[in-house]
Image: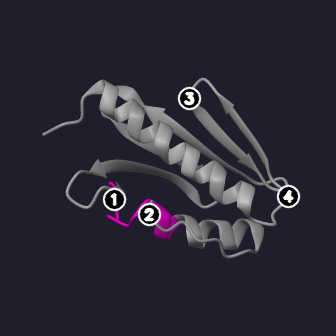
Amino acid sequence: MSLSEARFHDLVDATQQTLEDVFDDSELDVDLETSGGVLTVKFENGSQLIFSRQEPLRQLWLAAVSGGFHFDYDQESERWLCDKSEEQLGEMLVRIVEVQAGVKLDFEGL
C-alpha cells in the first residue's frame, strides 16, 4: 500500500523536525535552513547534508559528500529505508555525520 500525499508530507515533516532537534541538541556548530520543503544542514567545515522530498515517488532524498541516497518509508518498521541498501536513514546518518563532521550523533528513531 502506498502512502497518501498527506501522510507522506506528514512523515517528511516529522522526520525533518527530528533531524533539526538532533542537530540543535548537539554541540555541533551547524546552520539549518528549511526552504520549500528542503532541509539543508551546513557544517562548520563547509560540507552539507540536503534532505528533499520527492513527492511523485513518495521518497525522501539525501545528498551528502558520500553521494545521493533515496529512501522509501517502510510502514511495517515505521522507518525510512534506503532503496538500494535497505539501511535505515538513522543508521546511515550516524555514519555520514561522523565522516562529515567528526562527531557521532544519535539518530535513533529515524
Q: Residue at x 74, y 65 (%)?
A: 26
For the residue marked with disc 4, what is the amino acid? Asp
User: Where in the figure is residue 54, as x and y percent of width and height?
Assistant: 42, 32
User: Where in the figure is residue 89, as x and y percent of width and height?
Assistant: 45, 60
Whole-number angstrom distance, CA of label 1 to CA of label 2: 20 Å
Whole-number angstrom distance, CA of label 2 to CA of label 4: 23 Å
Q: Which residue is under mark 3?
A: 37
Which quarter of the picture shows residue 82? bottom left
Which label belongs to residue 84? 1
Furthest residue toward left: 1
Q: Which residue is under mark 4?
A: 29
For the residue marked with disc 1, what is the amino acid? Lys
Q: Compared with residue 65, is residue 51 higher up or lower down, i.e. above or below?
A: above
Instruction: Read off the magenta span.
Output: 82-92
Q: Compared with residue 51, is residue 91 higher up or lower down, i.e. above or below?
A: below
| Labels 4 and 3: the sequence-earlier one | 4
Labelled pair 2, 3 in contact (Cβ < 8 Å): no
| Labels 1 and 2: the sequence-earlier one | 1
Whole-number angstrom distance, CA of label 3 to CA of label 1: 24 Å
Q: Secondary structure at mark 3?
A: loop
Q: Compared with residue 12, is residue 100 higher up or lower down, i.e. above or below?
A: below
